Image (cartoon, grey):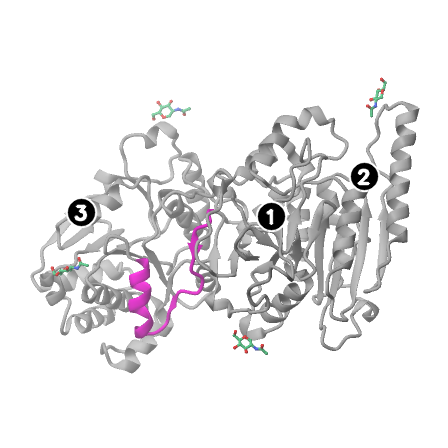
Amino acid sequence: MVGAPKKHFLPLLLFISLFALFFFSHYHNPSLPNPNPNFTPTETLISQNPTQPFTFLIKVLAFNRLDSLSRCLRSLSAAHYGGDTVHLHIYIDHFPPANDSSDLLDQKLEDSRRILDFADGFDWPFGGKAVHYRTANAGLQAQWLEAWWPSSDREFAFVVEDDLEVSPLFYKFVKAVILNYYYNATNSSPFIYGVSLQRPRFVPGKHGNKMRLEGEKKLFLYQLVGTWGQILFPKPWKEFRLWYDQHKTKGIRPFLDGMVTNGWYKKMGERIWTPWFIKFVHSRGYFNIYSNFQHERALSVSHRDAGVNYGKTAGPDSQLLSENSLDFNLLEMPSLSDLRWYDFCFREVFPGRVVRTLDELGPVLMSVQRQQTVMLVSVYGALETIIRNLLCHFERLGIRNYIFIGPQSDLLSDLARRGHPVIDADQLIHNIRESKSMRFQDSSASIMKDILVKAYVIKKCLDDGYNSWIVDANVLFVSNDMPHELVSSAEHFYAWKGSQVFSVRNSSAVKKLWGDGFLEKVAAKAGQVSSPQENKDFVDVVLKVLQKNGARISWVDEASYGMKIGANSFNQTSLEAGKKVIYWSGEMSPDVIQKRLGELNMWIVDGDYSCSAVVCTGS
Ligand SMILES: *[C@@H]1O[C@H](CO)[C@@H](O)[C@H](O)[C@H]1NC(C)=O
Ligand SMILES: *[C@@H]1O[C@H](CO)[C@@H](O)[C@H](O)[C@H]1NC(C)=O
Ligand SMILES: *[C@@H]1O[C@H](CO)[C@@H](O)[C@H](O)[C@H]1NC(C)=O
Ligand SMILES: *[C@@H]1O[C@H](CO)[C@@H](O)[C@H](O)[C@H]1NC(C)=O
């Protein structure tokens, strides 16, 4: 990156300064990465200070801007470390080869020597200082990535580009964050990858639009990395390095449609690193801690000095928070559950919505419903990949009123922690039994639990005035038409012949029907053990009970709405026949489903089973 001819980059540079971004810089690079992750670090690096249970490394990335580096280091050494040991590592990148005149080369060599002399002479009384001077130009990606390989889970790195300046208060804040959100076991999350000290300002999923921050909350979580002052946590960083290695080695590229950074990657390729990190964070569902100190104040500012990012100096992006301007308690750390979490669209996500008890059901249904309608999707018997693909379609269509029902499982907890509401059927059934709100034979069969939980949740929806739909995981909506039709349908019960979709309308008549004794009838019907060949699922059972009670069902032939996929492959034209849904039989093999959906451009998860795009509409 450093060596690229400047004129080549000018339009892009302009573009990037427009969006006031961070991303690449000039400087620096690599440390002495430990090639063996199992290597046990020597304890000598670990601080002697008993109140500091971690090692703190500052990684300064520099290149050829002595004035910038000097301002940066001075600000770092003016910070309050409260007696803690803090190590300083300075990475000085080499200039790239060029057919320059001998005079120009001498000038460049002289500049490098002055930077090195300055770094060598810089007094750092807080811990060890190390200078790493490269023999060749590293390029930005290697610079960031090789700057650190955590030598233990107690080591934290603060990566500082040379045109940054930090507040004297930065370390106090960072230490409080680490102690409160990393070391407090009841108040930490393995899905937080670090802390950004820069002022949050940009939303990559909305074409890089400016962020509009509301409210007074001083801390929040956001997925985007903030490269103007980023503290990295050891475990996620190590995970990222291994993930990067795996993908890069196999030639898998970090495309993520819908993100402004995707365009940067297409132009800049391997010269920048952030598209890789963003893709990793997206696929894992990780978050970064940000501060919102108001009045454009931050603990780290970028001077956006002239160089590769900026044709000419753009000036500081924010105001440094100083002791004089401090008008609040910087060390106040609310509990993690009181913080707000935001995705790449700066859309709030609500991790941990898990319904295990009857009391939890009402509030979650209320948060999930849209237009008084809730969509129940069962993960019983469905493959994880199918569920992940389904979620990407929900995101694409802006469908947000879904809730998953399933047995206790890693999949269910992962969905919940990424912000998708779930009902833990095992726990809820247990709770329903204990509360005697429904009498039924105990059964460990998961299909039985699925049936009972759905019947119960529909009852709760009716009690609270919501319409509900039961939607099979083997159905994908092509557009929003179908959901809209379902919502506006006046029918009490509406069922697909193949029982992939079943809807229950909120009305007093239906509520009465689904009232006293109905759940017991469903339980009894479901409990009638019949031949294993009988396709006994929720819709079959409920329809039998409803029909016995004289309810009128509106039937729909699914083939009139949708297209069933099967053994035959087909192409794009097949989809354009006005079909609103794609569906398939539960017996179809996963490979074939994936193949067919791929042919229809409906397989929109990537190799990590994360969505291949970020879609911000519907937020
Ligand atoms: C320097 O010039 C030579 C000959 O013109 C050319 O082959 C080479 O690629 C150039 N090197 C660089 C780094 O531009
Ligand atoms: C850990 O976090 C919880 C929740 O915020 C808090 O109540 C508790 O006091 C914290 N413990 C310590 C030792 O700070
Ligand atoms: C549900 O239906 C009842 C009875 O028809 C009606 O009074 C109520 O307003 C409906 N609830 C909602 C949220 O529309
Ligand atoms: C796509 O399907 C249509 C209709 O079945 C067919 O006429 C056309 O030849 C197919 N195209 C390709 C490329 O297979």
Q: Quadrant of residue 459?
A: bottom left
| Residue under label 1 | 318
Where disc 3 sits, the SS reads: helix
Q: Quadrant of residue 184?
A: bottom right
Give the alpha-carbon distance from disc 2 to disc 3, as whole Å: 65 Å
Give the residue furthest to the left. Answer: 550
Mark 2–mark 3 contact, CB under 8 Å? no
| Image position, residue 279 (x, y; %) | 57, 46
Q: Amino acid at mark 2?
A: Asn
| Image position, residue 341 (x, y; %) | 48, 58
Where disc 1 sits, the SS reads: loop
Where disc 2 sits, the SS reads: loop
Mark count: 3
Q: Is residue 5 above or below residue 65?
A: above
Q: Is 25 left or right of 481, judged from the image as shown?
A: right
Q: Nearer the viewer, mark 2 or mark 1?
A: 1
Write the start and end of the magenta stretch as one range. Answer: 345-368
| Residue under label 2 | 64
| Residue under label 3 | 488
| Image position, residue 82 (x, y; %) | 74, 70
Give the alpha-carbon distance from disc 2 to disc 1, as whole Å: 24 Å
